[in-house]
Amino acid sequence: MKDNNFFNVIIIGGGPAGIAAGLTLNSRNISTVIVEANQLSNQKVGECIPPNAYPLFQKMGLESLLVDEKHHLYYGNKSVWGTSVLHEKLFLFDRYNKGILLNRTYFEKQLQDISKRNQINWLVDYTLYTINKEKNFTKVVLKSKTDELTLFCNYVVDATGRKASVCRKLGIEKKTLDQLASLSFKCQIKTTIPFYVHTESFENGWIYVSPSEGDNVIVMIFTDLDLIPSKNKGKDFILDIMNNSQLGQKVFKTRLEEDNIFDITTRIANTTYLEKPFGGNWLAIGDAAYSFDPLSSYGITSALASGYYGGHALADILLKKEEALDVYHYIMRDVFENYKVQLHEQYALESRWANSIFWSRRN
C-alpha cells in the first residue's frame, strides 16, 4: 500500500453533505479525499434557506456564500393550506428576518471552490466499484471510464444522496416511510412572482412555487409516486391542478396552457432513514442517512449539518473517542424524530380531503 493511496477518510459524493464533511475533517487535520462522479450536478431547482438556518451557516463559516447576486432574498411564505384562503407569514419579526433562495448549482460550485482553496483532495469522474474490509484498513476500488484506482482508508463516508450507493454496496437497506414524489417543471408566464415561497394543498398532494425574477417560474407538484400519471398525460395532469388552484388565480393571474409548460421531471421526494447510520468502517450523512419531505425545508440545511457533525464524529473516533459515532447518531436521530412530529402536524392541518388517497395516507 502506497502512502499516496491511503486516506483516513474517503468521502463518496461531492454534494453539500460531502463537502461539509470534507471541510470539517480538513479543519481537524484528517487526511481526506472526496470522490465525485460528476464535476457539477445536473441543474437543480432553487432551494429555500429559511431564516432559522443562518446560525448553522455561521457556525460553519459559510455565511458569506449567501451574500451573492446569484442567490436571492425572500421575505416570507404564502400558503393555501387547510382553507381556501391565502395566508401570509412574514419573516419581519424573526431574529433573522429574511430567507435565501439558493441557486443550487451555483451554491455547490461555491462549496467546491472553498474545498479546493482549503486543499482538499478531489477525484472527479470516478464511481465506487467495490468496498472491502481488510485486516487493518478498508480497500476501496474506484472506476472511471478509462481508469481503475485502488485506495485504502479507515472510514468511508456515504454522501451519495438518496441512492445511498455505499450502503447498497454494503448490503444495508434504508427504511421508507412514504412514496412522495414530485413533478417539477418550468412555467413560462408574463407575471413576475413576488419573492415569497408559495405552497398550496390540493386533493391529492400539494404545490410549491419558487420565487423567480424571470418569466420562467419553477413549480413542483408533490403527490405519491403511484398517483403520478403516465408521461403522455403529464401536461393534462399539471394543467388541471394549476388552473384550479388559488396560486394559479392569485399569483400567476393567468390560465396556463400546454405551451407554458416545459422541462417536466419526476423526482423522488420521500422520507427515508437508516436505523443506524454508521458501522465499523463507514458513516452515512445527508440524504444517504436521512431524507426529508421537502415540505419541511430540512433538505440542504440537514445535509450541511450532518456533514459537519459527521465530520467531527469521524475526527473524534480516529482520536479513540469511542462514543463519537453514537453521539452523531443521537444528534441526527433526534433531528429526525422532531422532523416526523412537525411533518405530521403540518399535514394534519389539511382536513378538506380526508378521504382522498394522498391525505388518508398521512392523517
Image (cartoon, helix red, strand yellow):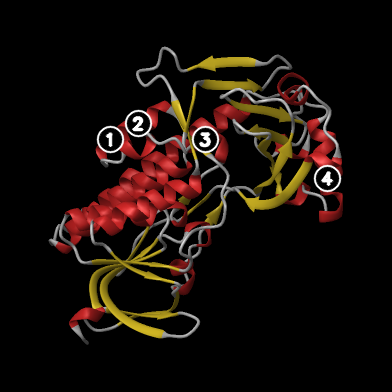
Residue type of the residue flagged with mark 1: Gln
Q: Residues within 10 Å of mark 4 (few under 14, many from 20)?
A: many
The answer to whether residue 329 is left or right of residue 148 is left
Point out residue 18 in the picture as x, y percentages from the top left corner: 37, 57
Res. 321 image quadrant: bottom left
Give whichever of discs 4 and 2 has the lower sequence position.
2
Q: Secondary structure at mark 1?
A: helix
Q: Whole-Å distance between the Cαs marked 1 and 3?
A: 21 Å
The residue wearing badge 2 is 54
Residue 235, numbered label? 4
Alpha carbons under labels 4 and 3: distance apart: 27 Å
Circle 1 or circle 3, nearest the eye: 1
Type of residue at label 2?
Tyr
In the rendered image, residue 144, in percent from the top left (x then y), is placed at 46, 79
User: Where does label 1 land, which residue?
Assistant: 58
Q: Is residue 140 left or right of residue 233?
A: left
Pinpoint residue 212: horizontal percent, then vertical percent: 60, 32
Specify which label sits upstream in the sequence, 1 or 3.
1
Q: Check contact, mark 1 vs mark 2: CB within 8 A.
A: yes
User: Residue drawn 28% across and 83% down?
Assistant: 134
Going from the N terminus, do you reach mark 4 or mark 3 first? 4
- The kind of residue on which mark 3 rests is Ser
* Dot in front, 3 or 2: 2
Label 1 and label 2: CA atoms lie apart by 6 Å
